[in-house]
Amino acid sequence: MSGEIRTGSARMRLRGLIRKEFLQIVRDPSSIAIAFLMPIILLLLFGYGVSLDSEHVPVALVVEKSNADTIDFTSRFEHSKYLVPSYYASTREAEQAMMAGRVNAIVVLRQDFGRTLRQSDGAPIQLIVNGVDANTARIISGYVQGVWGNWLAHYAEQRGQKFEAPVELQQRVWFNSELRSRNFLVPGLVALIMTLIGALLTAMVMAREWERGTMEALLVTPLSMREVIVGKLLPYFVLGMGGLALAVSMSLFLFGVPLRGSLWVLIVTSALFLVAALGMGLLISTIARSQFVAGQLALITTFLPAFLLSGFIFDIGSMPPVVQVITHIVAARYYIAILQTVFLAGNDWSVIVPNALALVAMATIFLGITWKKSRKRLE
Amino acid sequence: MNTASHDSAPPAPAMQDSGVALAVNQLSKSFHIGERRIQALHDVSFSVRHGVVTGLVGPDAAGKTTLMRLAAGLLVPDGGAITVLGLDAATQSLAVQGAIGYMPQRFGLYEDLSVQENLDLYADLQGVPESTREQRYRELMHMAGLAPFGKRLAGQLSGGMKQKLGLACALVRQPQLLLLDEPTVGVDPVSRRELWEIVYRLVREQGTSVLLTTAYLDEAERCDEVVLLHEGRLLDQGAPVVLRETMRGRSYRVTVAGMDKRTLQSRIAQAPGVMDALIQGDHVRMVMQNDTPPDYAALLPGVEGVKAEAVPPRFEDSFVALIKGKDRSDASAPESTPLPDPGGTTSHSTRLAKVASQVAGYLPEGARGQSRRVRLRTGINGAQAHPTTAPENAPLPDPTAESGQSAAPVIEVHNLQRRFGDFYAVNNISFEVSQGEVFGLLGANGAGKSTTFRMLCGLLPPSGGTLRVAGADLRHAAAAARARIGYMSQKFSLYGNLSVAENLRFFSSAYDLTGMRRTRRIQWALDEFELAAMADITSGDLSLGYKQRLALACALMHEPEILFLDEPTSGVDPLARREFWSRINALAGQGVTVMVTTHFMEEAEYCDRLAVMAAGEILTMGTPGAIKAEARSAALPEPTMEDAFIGLIMAHDEQRTAA
């Protein structure tokens, strides 16, 4: 009989907790900010602002002696969508512009441009690249070489000569044929947003209950600790799925990222990741009892790894072996692999299944520890 | 008892018949904070009877909250057991939690939920059946006077209303035992009184047993029974009346015509056979160590015109007697905390005497030049007649000095205002404080005391009005004028992870002390406040009383002329408070002007003059005696400061509603 009463009451208790949580979410500006404002800002920032493609790179052109050839060559720069040329009278001025950060590279056409062009071993142009950002420097150098190569071929052709390149490379890019970094950044952001809601927000709201002394009042009711955990899990799961819906619709409709896999696979795997993230958030809250500590812990142990060690921006394959090993404990790593596959490649089960299993394992571990560790005690 | 009617409540425990609601048996509990182990409770045993109000009384860190949490099953004891309604709190905690109501400190309310939503939440959690809720809510809201505020967010309620809502939430499923942890902290006296009425109605009408904690000794007197805790040990248990009656015939109210009350207090405190001496308005309340009538010739040799009258004992007398008795018997006992002296193993009266004479060595440089001449009236053989026995060789302040008459005011405030948005935290207040005066601002939380202080110290710009401190507006003449003030905040503003000596060194350099003067001042502080033995102890590890001493020492490093004290003694035990005030009195005797905020009625009595504040306004101003006299009526021939305070608040509220 008492069991019957207890089930009935457990439903009532959970209902009370969940209703309370939703009222708090709706009324608390910081919850709304983390759940909806931050995702929108991140999406806009990464969708429009951050791009790993170098476009419109300012380049200084120094033409020491102008002639028909140089004019023809420099006009190629003006038609490039990747480079924006500006003209300088001397190398010195161009160098000053580079120092001041106005240009990223200098292309010098020497006085003897016309003469060396016709010699087989000559170097008629000089390229100076700002190498501070090695990645960009390589890209610029590639662009300029491309312009030069194309022009040279064109030049040779015009004179009826055969221009011989040692090897001809025919490139074909798969999955992201336009090579738009947005196409893999924006799906990756979904993982960051779910980490924010699942881990950061959840850890903070639990810590807030400790800080404000309301947890003490909750614990002295007939609630069990598991009810407290479920009462936090459910509302923030719903909130996290809401964040997912927001992020996915913005990716598809605003940024035109293709979704080549199935929406259902996306939803199910996202739910798995969200449960893992919630597990991390709740685990943090068993240690951290102030919002400050909870926030710091969540940022360092969940958000930053999801940013840096998940393959979101930096390719895991090119990390040092030790760091590669560490990435295996970052749940976002598995999720991002799934995301990039589902969005850009399609339902490739050989990628989805192992990663999804890893997510199940992580969710089980985090929630299991939390379940075990949470006792209805103040110490 | 009508408690068994709710279906989710566990079956009525069998112990009920024995008349014991809660039994504590050899209970011990310690905590680890980093390397340190703190013994919060030390072998405590007592029991709480059914159907009465029991008070768990003691200063901060006495172990009260720990005991409440153990009773609620939130902590597990290291040793011993606690039985609540016949259930073991550690092993059957869910059942205990189903049978009790518990209000934690700060009331456990969700501030972003409305009054009604808070009630709904706790009704859901406590499993109150939907069918009975309507009726129960109506009763509770009526009792708490919250009926019109159902839709208001809990965060927007006043302190008193929050407290009543917290109580209503704890009562939503009629508990058999109600645990209230510091229910009246941060609540104004009017609300405090109302809370007591509600608690007693519960006991009377529903037979609820109540256990509450409090640090206020005057409040303890309202309980049917009290359990006295001090530093984790049980001091005594019994009815407050009984405990108080043991002190009958030992308390006197003493005045000496023309003698300054501070001189009198300090002399009585050091006299043989005296247990306690306290300034109360215009007289000194003296408690003797036994009930033989005092011989004033021996007590105050050479003083004429002593007027003494026996007064009824107070509960605080017995508490002080118990702590002092314990200190004596404990002197050789092993200490429960790792501190060398956590607030009084040496005899207290000798320490007080030492304090008074040592502080006499303190003379602020600014005040020295203009120290006032002593104005003892003819026929009085005051301190000067007996320079060998009296500690105050230094000039005495004029006891009767009313503001602005004897000297130019040191602090002048005219029509001061401070607005936050539409809200006036301080609204048009004016007062003056003269040199050597102890001036108090008395009021509940949110009355505007701290805002006033911040403006006086130049930390907050006023929205209107003028103020001058030591002849300057601290907003503009910051550096120079600030060197002349000392400030001690409620939270003591110490660096908890620096040692005592490091704190002193830091504050002395913060006040630009250098070379010999710095060395001299640090040494002075270590000697003066008996901190030398613990110079290398991390200040976070000090007991509250020592923290308070260190904080005062830091505020005095640069020998300020004006001392601002923000709630200086909240939470410390009565002995530490007495010691603190004997230092303050000695400083005032040296010509230091002291301004103090307090919500503590007792403390207000130590001031020369005080301003009673509520809702940003000054309701009245005057000597403690005069303020109490205003409240005198046929029904209340001897009003206490609290009576006077409540009378003023009520009159103010009536005026407001009328307007």
Image (cartoon, coloured by chain):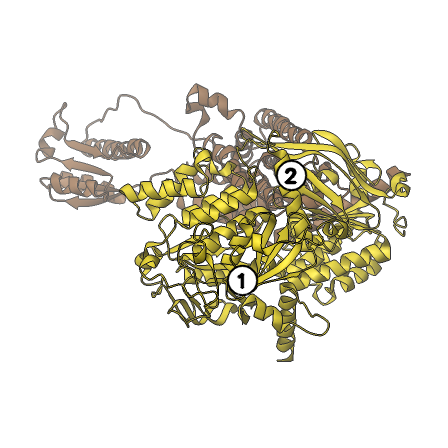
Q: What element carries label 1?
A: loop
Camera-side residue of A93 and B230? B230
Mark 1 falls within which chain? B
Residue B110, horizontal then vertical, whole percent? 65, 52
Q: What residue does disc 2 label?
A: B326
In the image, which lettered chain appears yellow? B
Q: Earlier in the sequence, mark 2 or mark 1?
A: 1
Query: Can residue B327 be seen by looking at this rendering?
Result: yes
For disc 2, the chain is B
Residue that carries the numbered disc 1 in the rendered image: B304
Q: Residue A56 carries which label?
A: none
Q: Which of label 2 and label 1 is nearer to you?
A: 1
User: Which quadrant of the figure has residue A79?
Assistant: top left
Amino acid type of the residue tagged 2 in the rendering: Lys
For chain A, the rendered hue is brown
Neighbours of disc 2 within 10 Å: few (<14), some (14-19), many (20+) = some
